Amino acid sequence: MTTPKKTPDGIEIPPPGPDDVLYEKADVYARIVLNRPTILNAMNRNVQRLLLAAFERAEADDDVKVVVLTGAGRAFSAGGDLYAYLYPDDDPAPSGVDVQMKIWSFPKPVIAAVRGHAVGQACELAGVCDFTIAAEGARLGEIHIRHGFPPPVLITPFLVSMKNAKELLMLGEQIDAQEALRMGLVNRVVPSESLDAEAEAMARKLAALPQTTVRLNKLLVNRAYELMGLRAALAYRDVPEIAAVADATRGDEVATSRLALLHEAGWSAFLSTRDAMYRERPADGGTDGE
């Protein structure tokens, strides 16, 4: 058994395990659950492997008509695991793009049920699902810019308007569920205690409809966005000029100093420095953070 490792400030990071993603079948639909609740379901290579395997399992099961994707505990996911390096993992694993494009092209409807944080890579994971239901109190955001990272999956410009896409991607702020609804990141906002029931009700409604037409209509909507250039946009790293700028983010002075602080002083010091400007906003006195 692997002994859990700790950050410099004593926060315990659990080792990767086979239960980091759970698969639960409920007759006509399956629940896929991100299951690292003590670190807000942060995603690493092991999670990506298990997520892809879970979707492949659901695709192969003819009894499963719909998938509900959610997170255990108080969050959907805090995004990429910034402490993944504590457990070196060189085994083959799909990228975030691979997993999310699996969901995009998945022949069955996928519903994201979001409570708590869905930020960074997790905001995109929820966004690429066919439907996103958010609990009141949920917080979403494309916060990669706070770390100096480019967006792994460029889905947001296809979900919201140009102005909102730039606000989300360039400011890196978190927004509440109602603002996410206004922008178009989510379909519905429901009381937290009703989230699972609402997701199940939608799954059962979808499962009761003519399945060939359900799948056709998903294909048709996806085709419309692909004709608008979605796949080309996702492949931005294939454009030399953009790839050069994306690669340069790794050497950004602000980003490297923040990540060095994360490794040397720990999560609390990293958050305090990284998110200071968000905590000091005078508009509502609120705080952003995972």
Image: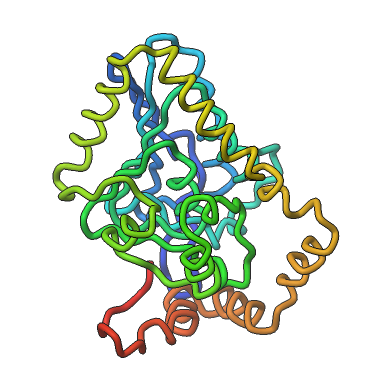
Q: Quadrant of the C terminus?
A: bottom left
Question: What x and y, as percent, mark residue 164?
Answer: 46, 65
Q: Is residue 174 visible?
A: yes
Rendered position, 240 above or below 133: below
Rendered position, 115 above or below 143: above
| Residue 279 placement, left or right of 227 | left
| Residue 209 placement, left or right of 130 | left
Rendered position, 161 above or below 215: below
Return the residue nearer the eye: 188 or 246: 188
When asked about the image quadrant of residue 248, the answer is bottom right
Residue at the image point whose x is 45% and y is 54% from the top: 123
The total number of labels drawn is: 0
| Residue 192 placement, left or right of 224 | left
When asked about the image quadrant of residue 177, the answer is bottom left
Residue at the image point whose x is 23% and y is 50% from the top: 189
Rendered position, 122 above or below 194: below
Question: What x and y, as percent, mark residue 169?
Answer: 53, 67
Residue at the image point whose x is 85% and y is 59% from the top: 240
Question: What x and y, as percent, mark residue 28?
Answer: 31, 15
Q: How is the image coloured?
A: rainbow
Residue at the image point whose x is 38% and y is 10% from the top: 63
